[in-house]
Image (spheres, rainbow, N blue to C red):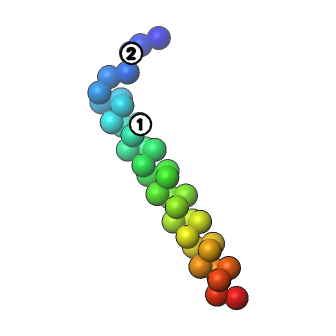
Amino acid sequence: MQALTLEDFLFLQKKLAITLYTLYSFCKALVEKATQT
């Protein structure tokens, strides 16, 4: 198994941040939909 390079780490971090932000936006939209009705 190869050790993680800094570039790999930064790429994974960016990917994780995008995933978390997408989930956050999705949940926020659901909550807003639920509170409107």
Residue 9 is situated, as x and y percent measured from the top left of the image, at 36, 31
- Label 2 residue SS: loop
User: Measuring 62% from the left and 74% from the top, which residue is drawn there?
Assistant: 31
Left or right of 5: which side holds 35?
right
Picture quadrant of residue 27? bottom right
Picture quadrant of residue 29? bottom right
- Label 1 residue SS: helix
Disc 2 residue crowd, few under 14, some 14–19, many 20+, Cα 10 Å: few
The residue that label 2 is drawn on is 3
The residue sitting at the bottom extreme is: 37
Question: 27 above or below 11?
Answer: below
Residue 19 is situated, as x and y percent measured from the top left of the image, at 49, 50
The residue that label 1 is drawn on is 12
Q: Foreground residue, 32 or 1?
A: 32
User: Measuring 68% from the left and 79% from the top, which residue is drawn there?
Assistant: 34
Amino acid type assigned to the residue bearing label 1 in the image: Leu
Picture quadrant of residue 12? top left
Residue 36 is situated, as x and y percent measured from the top left of the image, at 64, 87
